[in-house]
Image (cartoon, rainbow, N blue to C red):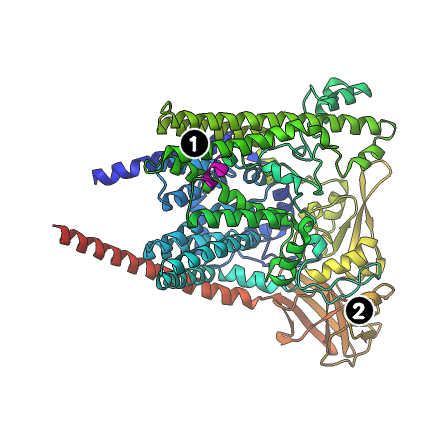
């Protein structure tokens, strides 16, 4: 027992150190403050209705009417029955947010390096290099929590896979299952998809190695075990995966039936996202060196350039007070790359990249090649439209690649691979069986490449124009001062370029010097680890805190209630009816926080609604607004405030029509809405079971009960009629009932619901009853039970083997 405790004690101390570092970096959480994340503010607005419903009823709605006219909540934090892996995730994330994610970065990477047989000191060093990578910190600052969540579990997934290939089949299977289940539960399938691409490279390298070593039976046995582990992990997340898969087909990620754009021009036919949208955020070739020199291209779009900057001088020269000038320079758009907007550079670290280059010349074998392969793949694909041949091939031919946008984010893979290989550079440096001559040669080459690159940028900085894609806009916006503004901006960009290139050169020289001293027996192994820990922490944390620091933290109330009702909101909230609001005075999810809004903030809206929005709602087409029962429009007033315009012509919650036109294509249905009188007519491409109906002036249909997932209407019509409802059609879940009996309903006016209603008095109900939730929950329960049984069997087997080995040696 004493031996086991002594063996575990270093790991315990490392874990305690990770906890302390996580809390230290995000120290305001210790005083009860919370990080203010812009994307989470939008999420709170979007999910407010379902959160309120859950709090009031203890139930889950799975549908919200507060955004985009109505949509499923599957990608808005829906909670599912029997999702036990989420409970485990909650246990692992025991620290206050976002320290919990930073801790997960650390511990996952630490376990990965331990799996690769790295000693605990170097494993801890590697964890710091990974966890403090600037991109991983900045996504916590802006609120890309699900992305951070998925990235944090990537090392654990790799750990399980590597254990299986190391013939540690039982523990490898168990870890892969749990880690993959956690990875999927993070609910950022783009990151999981990128991890899959890396695993395929790893698998290809291991297959080739197994072939050379005549170990193919072991390889395929490992693949079989891993396949079963992944299937089980998918099963434990079945509800979310199945619901998402069902929703994707109807979302902007699915295939559109339209072949025209709002302006009438032909639309490119794709099975997923539009190619321009996918590649909008494409990494520039020159931006590659941001990995090594943080502000080579100006850093981000809101840099604090300080009092000694040319921008500060510019503001004071045009009459700004020192206080005003300091306020302005805190958000200077110094980024001059070719992406639309960048919060911060994807800086991996000068010290880490130097070690990576060093490792390229001392590390050999399959580990090196899958890490280098993953790094190169990640970098090339991140170029997006700037490397169109490769990107177009992946979009056109690689399954599911066209479902994801912002291709530059695939760089998370190189941010995972580079620190691993960097640490193995130190592992080989410490190996006694490798000659110092080879290590010294590798050091000279690495220092020459890394240091030489920094020197080249310093020598040839005059070759760059430091012009950003938005400089023309700034020149116009500042009028007579426009050119002076841009000149000051370019001067500060050049200064940042110079400062950070020099900074990188110094860090490279210090790193190279430390290794040289070690090779000359002037530094011990332990001291060298301490030196690199100091260098890496100094390097990365100093850059990280330019973008995420104590200023990002606010009181909990500002996070939980990020929006304050304005005069227009308060006036609209006096109306307790069921209707929709169009807010043209603001964007994002603000209106969704207070009202059933036609707008919102989401990367995967319902595809048909998004198309209708672009065609008509964004153009304020009154007939289309009326059919959504848009009762209020929030607009700016002349005094700089907002006011609620009341639309007296809104169609209401439901109405009978006199004419239903059948058209043959989505194009025809969409274009017909341009001038359609939606109060009396409707258009559809669907085949109806009955088309015989008539309208009478005495016919009425009124909403009598409303919940997000349930609507009840009372219908009274002397004739058979056809009613249109101001609700978004979603066939995979919404069921219609007349007097308690299930009846078919149809999609009309491109996005709305419609159905024939027989004459007389009837109760019409719409219930959101997604079968996918019931089926998925059953699979999740069964998979969780099966995994629990396998854990018990594995425990018994391992215990038996330990007992047998103990008896054999006694």
Residue at position x 75%, y 52% from top? 581
Residue 356 painted magenta: yes
Which residue is nearer to you in this view: 63 or 489?
A: 489
Which residue is nearer to you in this view: 70 or 113?
A: 113
- Quarter of the image where the N terminus is located: top left
Alpha-carbon distance for marks 2 and 1? 72 Å
The location of residue 134, given as percent across then percent down, is: 56, 36
Label 2 sits on a secondary structure element that is: helix
Label 1 sits on a secondary structure element that is: helix
Sequence-first disc among 2 and 1:
1
Check the image and report above or below for 800 versus 354.
Answer: below
Is residue 131 among the parts visible in the rendering?
no
Can you identify the residue that label 2 sits on? Answer: 669
Magenta-drawn segment: 355-361
Name the side, left or right, on which 402 lies relative to 779. Answer: right
Can you identify the residue that label 1 sits on? Answer: 440
The location of residue 770, given as percent across then percent down, is: 57, 66
Check the image and report above or below for 602 versus 680.
Answer: above
As drawn, the label of residue 198 is none
Quarter of the image for residue 65 reads: bottom right
Residue at position x 57%, y 53% from top? 190
Residue at position x 22%, y 39% from top? 3
Residue at position x 79%, y 27% from top? 487
Name the side, left or right, on which 476 lies relative to 586. Answer: right
The location of residue 225, given as percent across then percent down, is: 38, 62
Crowding at mark 1 (Cα within 10 Å: few <14, some 14-19, many 20+): some
Name the side, left or right, on which 789 lies relative to 347. Answer: left
């Amino acid at each position: 027992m004493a031996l086991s405790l002594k063996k575990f004690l270093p790991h315990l101390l490392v874990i305690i150190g990770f906890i302390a570092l996580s809390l230290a970096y995000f120290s305001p959480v210790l005083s009860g403050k919370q990080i203010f994340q812009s994307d989470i503010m939008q999420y709170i607005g979007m999910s407010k209705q379902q959160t309120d419903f859950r709090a009031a009823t203890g139930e889950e709605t799975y549908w919200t009417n507060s955004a985009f006219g109505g949509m499923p909540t599957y990608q808005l934090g829906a909670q599912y029955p029997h999702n036990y892996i989420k409970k485990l995730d909650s246990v692992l994330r025991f620290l206050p947010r976002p320290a919990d994610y930073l801790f997960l970065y650390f511990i996952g990477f630490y376990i990965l390096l331990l799996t690769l047989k790295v000693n605990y000191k170097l494993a801890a060093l590697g964890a710091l290099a990974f966890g403090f990578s600037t991109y991983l910190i900045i996504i916590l600052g802006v609120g890309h929590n699900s992305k951070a969540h998925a990235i944090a579990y990537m090392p654990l997934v790799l750990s399980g896979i590597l254990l299986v290939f190391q013939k540690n089949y039982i523990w490898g299977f168990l870890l892969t299952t749990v880690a993959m289940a956690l990875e999927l539960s993070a609910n950022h399938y783009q990151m999981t998809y990128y991890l899959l691409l890396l695993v395929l490279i790893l698998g290809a390298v291991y297959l080739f190695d197994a072939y050379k070593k005549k170990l193919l039976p072991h390889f395929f046995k490992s693949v079989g075990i891993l396949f079963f582990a992944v299937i089980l992990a998918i099963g434990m997340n079945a509800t979310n995966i199945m619901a998402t898969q069902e929703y994707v087909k109807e979302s902007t990620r699915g295939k559109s039936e339209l072949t025209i754009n709002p302006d009438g021009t032909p639309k490119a036919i794709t099975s997923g996202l539009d190619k321009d949208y996918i590649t909008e955020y494409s990494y520039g070739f020159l931006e590659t060196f941001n990995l090594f020199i943080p502000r080579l291209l100006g850093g981000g779009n809101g840099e604090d350039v300080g009092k000694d900057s040319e921008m500060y001088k510019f503001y004071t020269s045009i009459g700004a007070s020192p206080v005003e000038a300091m306020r302005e320079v805190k958000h200077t758009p110094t980024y001059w790359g070719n992406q639309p907007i960048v919060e911060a550079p994807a800086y991996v670290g000068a010290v880490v990249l130097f070690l990576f280059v060093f490792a390229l010349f001392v590390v050999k074998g399959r580990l090196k090649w899958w890490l280098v392969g993953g790094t190169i793949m990640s970098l090339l694909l991140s170029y997006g439209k700037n490397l169109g041949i490769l990107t177009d091939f992946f979009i056109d031919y690689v399954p599911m690649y066209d479902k994801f946008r912002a291709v530059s984010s695939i760089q998370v893979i190189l941010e995972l691979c580079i620190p691993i290989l960097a640490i193995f550079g130190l592992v080989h440096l410490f190996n006694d069986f490798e000659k110092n001559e080879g290590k010294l040669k590798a050091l000279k080459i690495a220092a020459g490449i890394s240091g030489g690159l920094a020197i080249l940028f310093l020598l040839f900085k005059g070759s760059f124009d430091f012009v950003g894609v938005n400089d023309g806009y700034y020149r116009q916006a500042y009028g007579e001062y426009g050119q002076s503004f841009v000149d000051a901006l370019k001067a500060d960009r050049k200064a940042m370029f110079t400062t950070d290139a020099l900074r990188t050169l110094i860090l490279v020289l210090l790193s190279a010097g430390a290794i040289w001293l070690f090779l000359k027996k002037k530094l011990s192994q332990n001291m060298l680890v301490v030196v690199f820990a100091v260098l890496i922490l100094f390097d990365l944390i100093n850059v990280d805190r330019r973008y995420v620091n104590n200023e990002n933290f606010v009181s909990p109330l500002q996070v939980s209630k990020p929006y304050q009702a304005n005069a227009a909101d308060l006036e609209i909230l006096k109306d307790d009816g069921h209707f929709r609001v169009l807010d043209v005075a603001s964007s994002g999810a603000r209106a969704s926080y207070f009202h059933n809004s036609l707008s919102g903030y989401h990367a995967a809206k319902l595809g048909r609604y998004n198309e209708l929005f672009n065609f008509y709602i964004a153009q304020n087409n009154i007939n289309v607004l009326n059919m959504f029962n848009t009762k209020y429009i929030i607009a700016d007033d002349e005094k700089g405030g907002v006011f609620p315009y009341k639309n007296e012509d809104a169609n209401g919650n439901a109405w009978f029509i006199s004419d239903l036109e059948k058209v043959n294509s989505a194009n025809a249905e969409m274009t017909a809405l341009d001038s359609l009188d939606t109060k009396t007519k409707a258009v559809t491409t669907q085949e109806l079971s009955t088309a015989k109906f008539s309208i009478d002036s005495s016919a009425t249909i009124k909403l009598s009960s409303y919940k997000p997932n349930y609507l009840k209407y009372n219908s009274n019509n002397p004739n058979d009629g056809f009613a249109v409802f101001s609700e978004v059609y979603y066939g995979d879940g919404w069921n219609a009932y007349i007097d308690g009996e299930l009846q078919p309903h149809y999609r009309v006016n491109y996005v709305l619901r419609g159905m024939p209603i027989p004459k007389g008095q009837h109760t019409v109900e719409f219930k959101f009853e997604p079968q996918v939730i019931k089926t998925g929950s059953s699979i999740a329960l069964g998979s969780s039970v099966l995994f629990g049984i396998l854990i018990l069997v594995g425990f018994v087997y391992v215990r038996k083997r330990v007992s047998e080995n103990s008896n054999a040696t006694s």
